[in-house]
Image (cartoon, helix red, strand yellow):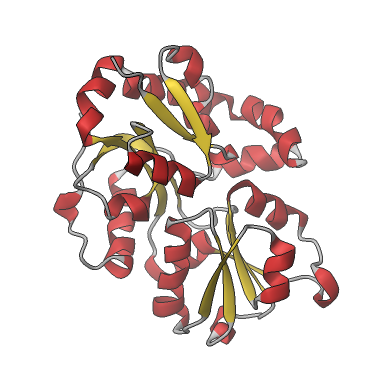
Amino acid sequence: MQQLTLGVIDYLNTLPLDYGISDRLPDVRVQRGVPTAINAAVLSGAVDIAPMSAYEWAQHTDELLVVPELSIATIGAVNSVNLFAWAADPRQLNGQTVALTTHSATSINLLRVLCDQHYHVHPEWVAMEPDLDPMLAKAAAALLIGDRALVEATMRRHIGPRGLPYLFDLGDEWLKLSGLPFVFAVWVVRRDRADAVRAAGIVPALQAAKASNIPNIDALALQYAPRLGLPAGVCAKYLRDLRYDLTSHDIEGLQTFLSYALPSFRPEQLVWFD
């Protein structure tokens, strides 16, 4: 029998859902990576079940089932999906170069939606590795996600001779536009591996890990904080501000985002893994 592989995004924000998962699933291989790498691994068949960028899932619903009650979402500020800009207002970015991290699928499309629907501007986009100094040396603004974005948002350091860039949290900006939660990632199962994933009990193990980890966020934050060079309290607050349950309200926010970002998407394309 082919060994199953579980994808894990190697960021702090997934820790409440997957910490200790190898102990719960000793026969399942774990592959770690940034969101774009995990997305590609799922689509290639190298990973059978994983958190996936919501925008990427919506483009491949014929291949993927969505796991209930698991997500990375927020209402308002997310603290780790940030636009750093030399402009005091994103509406000043019309025609300007904006650097997009190569590690994101959903967040770059969220920024595109915000520019179109909220700021009414049309920047010039350029993909760059996620390093704020060269990004802001080349561009008027830069999008970072994940741990690096959280660190930069917390430290708020000066970048080159221009000093301190302005910061716009895209979770907060989405709330201003829509009044709804934003879902950054959903857990997906490849349709052609659904029976094997079901037999291996991977989803119940993930749900058990979540039930065990959520009450212990302070301990998780204390353990992870040295990796980021941040206070444990900052990491704990960050985790508590996230939403992990993929509620009906979250799904409403997701479908609203997709109505802007991927107008061909239809709600019936969301098919649950059971």
- Identified at 48% across, 30% down, the residue is 31
Give the percent coordinates (x, y) of residue 70: 37, 36
Q: Is residue 123 above or below residue 273?
A: below
Give the percent coordinates (x, y) of residue 153: 69, 57
Residue 261 in sight here: yes
- Identified at 24% across, 28% down, the residue is 193
Q: Is residue 61 above or below residue 90?
A: above
Question: Can you tell which quarter of the image residue 218 is in?
Answer: top right
Residue 175 in sight here: no
Give the percent coordinates (x, y) of residue 80: 59, 52
- Identified at 27% across, 35% down, the residue is 190
Locate the C terminus and report the quarter of the image it occupies: top left
Residue 99 appears left or right of 159:
left
Q: Nearer the viewer, residue 27 or 111?
A: 27
Question: Can you tell which quarter of the image residue 13 is in?
Answer: top right
- Identified at 35% across, 22% down, the residue is 4
Q: Nearer the viewer, residue 117 or 187?
A: 187
Q: Nearer the viewer, residue 163 or 171?
A: 163
Give the percent coordinates (x, y) of residue 246: 34, 42
- Most extreme residue toward the left, as rendered? 268
Locate the N terminus and report the quarter of the image it occupies: top left
Q: Is residue 211 above or below residue 163?
A: above
